Protein backbone atom coordinates (compact mmCIF):
# COMPACT_ATOMS: atom_id res chain seq x y z
CA UNK A 1 0.00 0.00 0.00
CA UNK A 2 2.84 2.44 0.71
CA UNK A 3 5.82 0.98 -1.14
CA UNK A 4 7.81 1.46 2.05
CA UNK A 5 7.91 -1.16 4.78
CA UNK A 6 8.64 1.31 7.58
CA UNK A 7 5.74 3.57 6.59
CA UNK A 8 3.38 0.60 6.32
CA UNK A 9 4.53 -0.66 9.71
CA UNK A 10 3.88 2.75 11.28
CA UNK A 11 0.40 2.98 9.72
CA UNK A 12 -0.41 -0.52 10.91
CA UNK A 13 0.82 0.10 14.44
CA UNK A 14 -1.09 3.39 14.71
CA UNK A 15 -4.25 1.58 13.62
CA UNK A 16 -3.80 -1.22 16.15
CA UNK A 17 -2.87 1.27 18.88
CA UNK A 18 -6.07 3.20 18.26
CA UNK A 19 -8.11 0.00 18.43
CA UNK A 20 -6.30 -1.03 21.61
CA UNK A 21 -7.01 2.40 23.13
CA UNK A 22 -10.71 1.97 22.39
CA UNK A 23 -10.71 -1.55 23.84
CA UNK A 24 -8.99 -0.20 26.97
CA UNK A 25 -11.78 2.35 27.42
CA UNK A 26 -14.42 -0.35 27.12
CA UNK A 27 -15.26 0.56 23.50
CA UNK A 28 -13.82 -2.33 21.47
CA UNK A 29 -14.15 -2.40 17.69
CA UNK A 30 -17.03 -4.62 16.61
CA UNK A 31 -16.40 -4.45 12.88
CA UNK A 32 -13.31 -6.21 11.55
CA UNK A 33 -13.54 -4.05 8.41
CA UNK A 34 -12.76 -1.06 10.62
CA UNK A 35 -9.09 -2.16 10.80
CA UNK A 36 -8.70 -2.37 7.06
CA UNK A 37 -10.55 0.89 6.42
CA UNK A 38 -8.52 2.72 9.07
CA UNK A 39 -5.23 1.21 7.91
CA UNK A 40 -6.03 2.13 4.31
CA UNK A 41 -6.61 5.80 5.12
CA UNK A 42 -3.47 5.93 7.23
CA UNK A 43 -1.47 4.35 4.40
CA UNK A 44 -2.91 6.85 1.92
CA UNK A 45 -2.06 9.74 4.22
CA UNK A 46 1.49 8.47 4.67
CA UNK A 47 2.02 7.75 0.98
CA UNK A 48 0.97 11.29 0.05
CA UNK A 49 4.09 12.55 1.80
CA UNK A 50 7.49 12.53 0.14
CA UNK A 51 8.26 11.70 -3.48
CA UNK A 52 5.31 10.74 -5.65
CA UNK A 53 5.43 8.15 -8.42
CA UNK A 54 4.84 9.49 -11.90
CA UNK A 55 1.60 8.34 -13.49
CA UNK A 56 2.43 6.21 -16.50
CA UNK A 57 -0.03 4.86 -19.03
CA UNK A 58 0.51 1.09 -18.98
CA UNK A 59 -0.17 -1.38 -21.75
CA UNK A 60 -2.68 -4.13 -21.28
CA UNK A 61 -2.55 -7.71 -22.50
CA UNK A 62 -5.07 -10.51 -22.60
CA UNK A 63 -4.77 -13.00 -19.76
CA UNK A 64 -2.83 -15.94 -21.08
CA UNK A 65 -3.26 -19.60 -20.20
CA UNK A 66 0.28 -19.66 -18.88
CA UNK A 67 -0.24 -16.73 -16.53
CA UNK A 68 -0.39 -18.90 -13.35
CA UNK A 69 2.98 -20.39 -14.25
CA UNK A 70 4.41 -16.90 -14.83
CA UNK A 71 3.04 -15.73 -11.49
CA UNK A 72 4.49 -18.78 -9.74
CA UNK A 73 7.96 -17.67 -10.83
CA UNK A 74 7.52 -14.30 -9.19
CA UNK A 75 8.81 -13.32 -5.79
CA UNK A 76 6.05 -11.99 -3.46
CA UNK A 77 8.06 -8.78 -3.07
CA UNK A 78 7.93 -8.16 -6.83
CA UNK A 79 4.13 -8.34 -6.73
CA UNK A 80 4.06 -6.07 -3.68
CA UNK A 81 6.23 -3.50 -5.48
CA UNK A 82 4.03 -3.66 -8.59
CA UNK A 83 0.86 -3.11 -6.54
CA UNK A 84 2.51 -0.28 -4.56
CA UNK A 85 3.27 1.47 -7.86
CA UNK A 86 -0.35 1.38 -9.04
CA UNK A 87 -2.33 4.63 -8.78
CA UNK A 88 -5.15 5.08 -6.28
CA UNK A 89 -7.83 3.75 -6.04
CA UNK A 90 -6.55 0.83 -8.15
CA UNK A 91 -3.81 0.17 -5.59
CA UNK A 92 -6.28 -0.22 -2.70
CA UNK A 93 -8.63 -2.28 -4.85
CA UNK A 94 -5.85 -4.72 -5.77
CA UNK A 95 -4.51 -4.94 -2.22
CA UNK A 96 -7.90 -5.78 -0.75
CA UNK A 97 -9.05 -7.97 -3.65
CA UNK A 98 -5.98 -10.21 -3.63
CA UNK A 99 -5.97 -10.51 0.16
CA UNK A 100 -8.84 -12.90 -0.63
CA UNK A 101 -10.51 -11.98 2.67
CA UNK A 102 -13.59 -10.08 1.55
CA UNK A 103 -16.71 -10.61 -0.51
CA UNK A 104 -17.76 -8.02 -3.09
CA UNK A 105 -20.12 -6.25 -0.71
CA UNK A 106 -17.31 -5.80 1.83
CA UNK A 107 -14.91 -4.67 -0.89
CA UNK A 108 -17.38 -2.04 -2.07
CA UNK A 109 -17.82 -0.85 1.51
CA UNK A 110 -14.07 -0.72 2.19
CA UNK A 111 -13.19 1.02 -1.04
CA UNK A 112 -16.32 3.17 -1.24
CA UNK A 113 -16.80 2.07 -4.83
CA UNK A 114 -19.66 0.78 -6.89
CA UNK A 115 -19.42 -2.73 -8.30
CA UNK A 116 -18.87 -1.52 -11.87
CA UNK A 117 -16.01 0.73 -10.84
CA UNK A 118 -14.44 -2.03 -8.76
CA UNK A 119 -14.59 -4.61 -11.55
CA UNK A 120 -13.17 -2.06 -14.04
CA UNK A 121 -10.22 -1.37 -11.74
CA UNK A 122 -9.48 -5.07 -11.22
CA UNK A 123 -9.93 -5.97 -14.91
CA UNK A 124 -7.60 -3.19 -16.04
CA UNK A 125 -5.04 -4.21 -13.42
CA UNK A 126 -5.13 -7.83 -14.60
CA UNK A 127 -4.43 -6.77 -18.17
CA UNK A 128 -1.64 -4.40 -17.10
CA UNK A 129 -0.07 -7.01 -14.84
CA UNK A 130 -0.22 -9.61 -17.63
CA UNK A 131 1.56 -7.15 -19.93
CA UNK A 132 4.18 -6.55 -17.25
CA UNK A 133 4.60 -10.33 -16.76
CA UNK A 134 5.00 -10.81 -20.51
CA UNK A 135 7.71 -8.15 -20.53
CA UNK A 136 9.64 -9.41 -17.52
CA UNK A 137 8.92 -13.15 -17.35
CA UNK A 138 7.92 -14.28 -20.87
CA UNK A 139 6.24 -17.67 -21.07
CA UNK A 140 9.01 -19.18 -23.25
CA UNK A 141 11.76 -18.56 -20.69
CA UNK B 1 -23.30 -11.29 -10.72
CA UNK B 2 -24.56 -14.89 -10.56
CA UNK B 3 -26.18 -14.38 -13.97
CA UNK B 4 -22.93 -13.00 -15.38
CA UNK B 5 -20.96 -15.99 -14.05
CA UNK B 6 -23.59 -18.39 -15.42
CA UNK B 7 -23.45 -16.76 -18.89
CA UNK B 8 -19.67 -16.73 -18.82
CA UNK B 9 -19.62 -20.47 -18.17
CA UNK B 10 -22.17 -21.18 -20.91
CA UNK B 11 -20.39 -19.55 -23.85
CA UNK B 12 -17.22 -21.41 -24.85
CA UNK B 13 -14.97 -18.44 -25.62
CA UNK B 14 -16.13 -16.47 -22.64
CA UNK B 15 -15.86 -19.56 -20.44
CA UNK B 16 -12.26 -19.99 -21.49
CA UNK B 17 -11.44 -16.37 -20.68
CA UNK B 18 -13.26 -16.62 -17.37
CA UNK B 19 -11.36 -19.80 -16.43
CA UNK B 20 -8.05 -18.09 -17.25
CA UNK B 21 -9.03 -15.10 -15.20
CA UNK B 22 -9.94 -17.29 -12.23
CA UNK B 23 -6.66 -19.21 -12.49
CA UNK B 24 -4.80 -15.87 -12.69
CA UNK B 25 -6.55 -14.57 -9.57
CA UNK B 26 -5.90 -17.79 -7.65
CA UNK B 27 -2.22 -17.65 -8.57
CA UNK B 28 -1.91 -14.02 -7.44
CA UNK B 29 -3.82 -14.73 -4.20
CA UNK B 30 -1.46 -17.65 -3.49
CA UNK B 31 1.50 -15.38 -4.05
CA UNK B 32 0.01 -12.76 -1.70
CA UNK B 33 -0.51 -15.46 0.92
CA UNK B 34 3.18 -16.19 0.64
CA UNK B 35 4.09 -12.68 1.81
CA UNK B 36 5.57 -13.20 5.25
CA UNK B 37 4.12 -11.17 8.11
CA UNK B 38 6.93 -9.49 10.09
CA UNK B 39 7.23 -11.08 13.57
CA UNK B 40 6.72 -7.73 15.37
CA UNK B 41 3.45 -7.27 13.45
CA UNK B 42 2.25 -10.80 14.19
CA UNK B 43 2.99 -10.18 17.87
CA UNK B 44 0.33 -7.47 18.04
CA UNK B 45 -2.37 -9.95 17.07
CA UNK B 46 -1.18 -12.58 19.53
CA UNK B 47 -1.16 -10.22 22.51
CA UNK B 48 -4.13 -7.99 21.78
CA UNK B 49 -7.78 -8.93 21.61
CA UNK B 50 -8.93 -6.02 19.54
CA UNK B 51 -12.12 -7.17 17.87
CA UNK B 52 -15.01 -7.63 20.29
CA UNK B 53 -16.24 -11.20 20.11
CA UNK B 54 -18.98 -10.98 22.70
CA UNK B 55 -22.44 -9.53 22.37
CA UNK B 56 -22.91 -6.21 20.70
CA UNK B 57 -23.66 -3.17 22.84
CA UNK B 58 -26.92 -3.78 24.69
CA UNK B 59 -29.86 -1.36 24.51
CA UNK B 60 -29.22 -0.16 28.07
CA UNK B 61 -25.66 0.88 27.21
CA UNK B 62 -26.86 2.35 23.94
CA UNK B 63 -29.44 4.45 25.76
CA UNK B 64 -26.78 5.78 28.13
CA UNK B 65 -24.47 6.79 25.29
CA UNK B 66 -23.91 10.59 25.39
CA UNK B 67 -24.91 11.00 21.72
CA UNK B 68 -28.18 9.14 22.28
CA UNK B 69 -28.86 11.13 25.46
CA UNK B 70 -28.18 14.40 23.60
CA UNK B 71 -30.54 13.46 20.76
CA UNK B 72 -33.23 12.35 23.23
CA UNK B 73 -32.92 15.65 25.13
CA UNK B 74 -33.15 17.66 21.92
CA UNK B 75 -36.27 15.74 20.84
CA UNK B 76 -37.80 16.25 24.30
CA UNK B 77 -37.15 20.01 24.12
CA UNK B 78 -38.69 20.21 20.62
CA UNK B 79 -41.75 18.26 21.79
CA UNK B 80 -41.99 20.51 24.88
CA UNK B 81 -41.91 23.66 22.74
CA UNK B 82 -44.51 22.14 20.41
CA UNK B 83 -46.82 21.30 23.32
CA UNK B 84 -46.30 24.79 24.81
CA UNK B 85 -47.22 26.46 21.50
CA UNK B 86 -50.23 24.14 21.15
CA UNK B 87 -51.41 24.93 24.69
CA UNK B 88 -51.00 28.66 24.02
CA UNK B 89 -53.11 28.31 20.88
CA UNK B 90 -55.76 26.51 22.94
CA UNK B 91 -55.90 29.51 25.28
CA UNK B 92 -56.35 31.99 22.44
CA UNK B 93 -59.71 33.71 22.11
CA UNK B 94 -61.07 36.63 20.03
CA UNK B 95 -59.25 39.72 21.26
CA UNK B 96 -56.47 37.84 23.09
CA UNK B 97 -53.75 39.45 20.95
CA UNK B 98 -54.97 42.98 21.76
CA UNK B 99 -55.46 42.02 25.41
CA UNK B 100 -51.84 40.84 25.66
CA UNK B 101 -50.66 44.17 24.23
CA UNK B 102 -52.75 45.96 26.84
CA UNK B 103 -51.17 43.87 29.63
CA UNK B 104 -47.84 45.27 28.47
CA UNK B 105 -49.36 48.77 28.46
CA UNK B 106 -50.66 48.23 32.01
CA UNK B 107 -47.24 47.20 33.30
CA UNK B 108 -45.69 50.39 31.84
CA UNK B 109 -48.37 52.88 32.92
CA UNK B 110 -47.54 55.43 35.65
CA UNK B 111 -50.31 57.11 37.64
CA UNK B 112 -49.00 60.50 36.46
CA UNK B 113 -50.06 59.58 32.91
CA UNK B 114 -53.70 59.34 34.01
CA UNK B 115 -56.28 62.01 34.80
CA UNK B 116 -57.61 61.86 38.33
CA UNK B 117 -61.33 61.68 39.06
CA UNK B 118 -63.48 61.10 42.12
CA UNK B 119 -65.83 58.33 41.02
CA UNK B 120 -66.48 54.62 41.16
CA UNK B 121 -65.43 52.52 38.16
CA UNK B 122 -69.08 51.79 37.34
CA UNK B 123 -69.76 55.49 36.84
CA UNK B 124 -67.04 55.91 34.17
CA UNK B 125 -69.27 54.71 31.30
CA UNK B 126 -71.22 58.02 31.39
CA UNK B 127 -67.98 59.98 31.17
CA UNK B 128 -66.73 57.91 28.22
CA UNK B 129 -70.02 58.34 26.38
CA UNK B 130 -70.40 62.05 27.03
CA UNK B 131 -66.82 63.00 26.32
CA UNK B 132 -65.82 60.52 23.61
CA UNK B 133 -69.16 59.10 22.32
CA UNK B 134 -67.97 55.63 23.35
CA UNK B 135 -71.04 53.39 23.59
CA UNK B 136 -71.19 50.28 25.78
CA UNK B 137 -67.86 51.09 27.45
CA UNK B 138 -69.27 49.69 30.69
CA UNK B 139 -67.34 48.28 33.63
CA UNK B 140 -68.91 44.92 34.66
CA UNK B 141 -70.67 44.84 38.06
CA UNK B 142 -67.88 42.68 39.58
CA UNK B 143 -65.51 45.66 39.35
CA UNK B 144 -67.96 48.57 39.27
CA UNK B 145 -67.72 49.61 42.95
CA UNK B 146 -63.93 50.11 43.08
CA UNK B 147 -62.71 53.69 43.55
CA UNK B 148 -60.99 55.16 40.48
CA UNK B 149 -57.49 56.64 40.87
CA UNK B 150 -57.06 57.76 37.28
CA UNK B 151 -58.24 57.28 33.71
CA UNK B 152 -57.46 58.11 30.10
CA UNK B 153 -58.61 57.35 26.57
CA UNK B 154 -55.95 56.68 23.95
CA UNK B 155 -55.69 55.34 20.41
CA UNK B 156 -54.61 51.75 19.95
CA UNK B 157 -52.48 50.35 17.11
CA UNK B 158 -55.58 49.89 14.93
CA UNK B 159 -56.79 53.43 15.59
CA UNK B 160 -59.49 52.22 17.98
CA UNK B 161 -60.22 54.24 21.10
CA UNK B 162 -59.17 52.41 24.24
CA UNK B 163 -60.33 53.46 27.69
CA UNK B 164 -57.99 52.79 30.62
CA UNK B 165 -58.94 53.01 34.29
CA UNK B 166 -56.78 52.44 37.37
CA UNK B 167 -58.50 51.71 40.68
CA UNK B 168 -57.24 51.66 44.25
CA UNK B 169 -58.10 48.00 44.83
CA UNK B 170 -54.76 46.19 44.44
CA UNK B 171 -53.75 48.86 41.83
CA UNK B 172 -55.93 46.97 39.37
CA UNK B 173 -56.30 48.36 35.84
CA UNK B 174 -59.24 48.06 33.47
CA UNK B 175 -59.26 48.46 29.71
CA UNK B 176 -62.27 48.80 27.44
CA UNK B 177 -61.70 48.32 23.73
CA UNK B 178 -63.75 47.35 20.67
CA UNK B 179 -64.02 43.63 19.85
CA UNK B 180 -62.35 42.74 16.54
CA UNK B 181 -64.81 42.56 13.67
CA UNK B 182 -64.66 40.15 10.72
CA UNK B 183 -64.66 41.55 7.13
CA UNK B 184 -68.43 40.94 7.10
CA UNK B 185 -68.75 43.26 10.10
CA UNK B 186 -69.58 40.56 12.67
CA UNK B 187 -67.69 40.54 15.94
CA UNK B 188 -66.22 37.24 17.11
CA UNK B 189 -67.91 36.50 20.39
CA UNK B 190 -67.34 34.38 23.45
CA UNK B 191 -69.19 33.87 26.70
CA UNK B 192 -67.85 34.32 30.25
CA UNK B 193 -64.34 35.29 31.31
CA UNK B 194 -61.11 34.32 29.57
CA UNK B 195 -57.81 34.53 31.39
CA UNK B 196 -54.38 35.36 30.06
CA UNK B 197 -51.01 35.78 31.74
CA UNK B 198 -47.89 37.62 30.67
CA UNK B 199 -44.71 38.62 32.49
CA UNK B 200 -46.16 38.53 35.99
CA UNK B 201 -49.44 40.15 35.00
CA UNK B 202 -52.76 38.34 34.82
CA UNK B 203 -55.84 39.52 32.96
CA UNK B 204 -59.44 38.46 32.58
CA UNK B 205 -61.46 39.43 29.51
CA UNK B 206 -65.20 39.61 29.06
CA UNK B 207 -67.06 40.62 25.92
CA UNK B 208 -70.39 42.45 25.86
CA UNK B 209 -72.15 44.43 23.12
CA UNK B 210 -69.09 44.40 20.87
CA UNK B 211 -66.80 45.81 23.56
CA UNK B 212 -64.10 43.86 25.39
CA UNK B 213 -63.46 44.55 29.06
CA UNK B 214 -60.03 43.61 30.43
CA UNK B 215 -59.33 43.62 34.17
CA UNK B 216 -55.69 43.04 35.06
CA UNK B 217 -53.33 43.13 38.01
CA UNK B 218 -49.80 42.12 38.89
CA UNK B 219 -50.13 38.67 40.40
CA UNK B 220 -51.57 35.26 39.75
CA UNK B 221 -54.74 33.97 38.20
CA UNK B 222 -56.23 33.11 41.57
CA UNK B 223 -55.84 36.76 42.71
CA UNK B 224 -58.09 37.93 39.90
CA UNK B 225 -60.39 34.89 39.96
CA UNK B 226 -61.35 35.75 43.54
CA UNK B 227 -63.06 38.97 42.34
CA UNK B 228 -64.80 37.29 39.42
CA UNK B 229 -66.06 34.24 41.30
CA UNK B 230 -67.59 36.31 44.08
CA UNK B 231 -69.17 38.99 41.98
CA UNK B 232 -70.12 42.41 43.30
CA UNK B 233 -72.61 41.16 45.84
CA UNK B 234 -71.02 37.84 46.76
CA UNK B 235 -73.00 35.81 44.18
CA UNK B 236 -71.33 33.25 41.92
CA UNK B 237 -70.53 34.45 38.42
CA UNK B 238 -70.11 32.29 35.33
CA UNK B 239 -66.42 31.93 34.61
CA UNK B 240 -64.94 30.82 31.28
CA UNK B 241 -61.81 28.73 30.80
Image: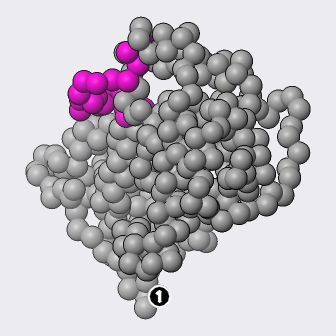
**Start and end of the magenta stretch?**
B48-69
* Residue A61 visible from this viewpoint: yes
The answer to whether residue B148 is above or below residue B175 is above
Residue appearing at x 50%, y 39% in the figure: B30
Query: How is this picture coloured?
Result: one colour
Q: Residues within 10 Å of mark 1 (few under 14, many from 20)?
A: few
* Residue B150 visible from this viewpoint: no
Q: Position of residue A16 (x, y in %)?
A: 52, 19
Q: Position of residue A91 (x, y in %)?
A: 67, 45
Tell whether B86 sits left or right of A103: left
Q: Position of residue B158 (x, y in %)?
A: 59, 71
The answer to whether residue B159 is above or below residue A21 is below
The answer for which chain carries disc 1 is: B
- Furthest toward the front, the residue is A140
Judging by the rendered image, the residue that carries numbered circle 1 is B183
Whether B55 is among the magenta residues is yes
Amino acid sequence: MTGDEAKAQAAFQDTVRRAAGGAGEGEPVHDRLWFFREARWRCLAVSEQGLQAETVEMEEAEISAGAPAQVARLEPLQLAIWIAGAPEPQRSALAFYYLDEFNYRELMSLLEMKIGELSDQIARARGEFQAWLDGHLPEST
Amino acid sequence: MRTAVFRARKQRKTAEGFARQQAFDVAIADLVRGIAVPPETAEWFVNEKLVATGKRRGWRRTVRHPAVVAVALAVAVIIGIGVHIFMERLEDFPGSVEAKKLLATASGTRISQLESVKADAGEMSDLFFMKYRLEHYNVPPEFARFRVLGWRVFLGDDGDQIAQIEVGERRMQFFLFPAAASPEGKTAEFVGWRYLEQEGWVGAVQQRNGVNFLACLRGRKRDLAAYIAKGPDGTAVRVGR
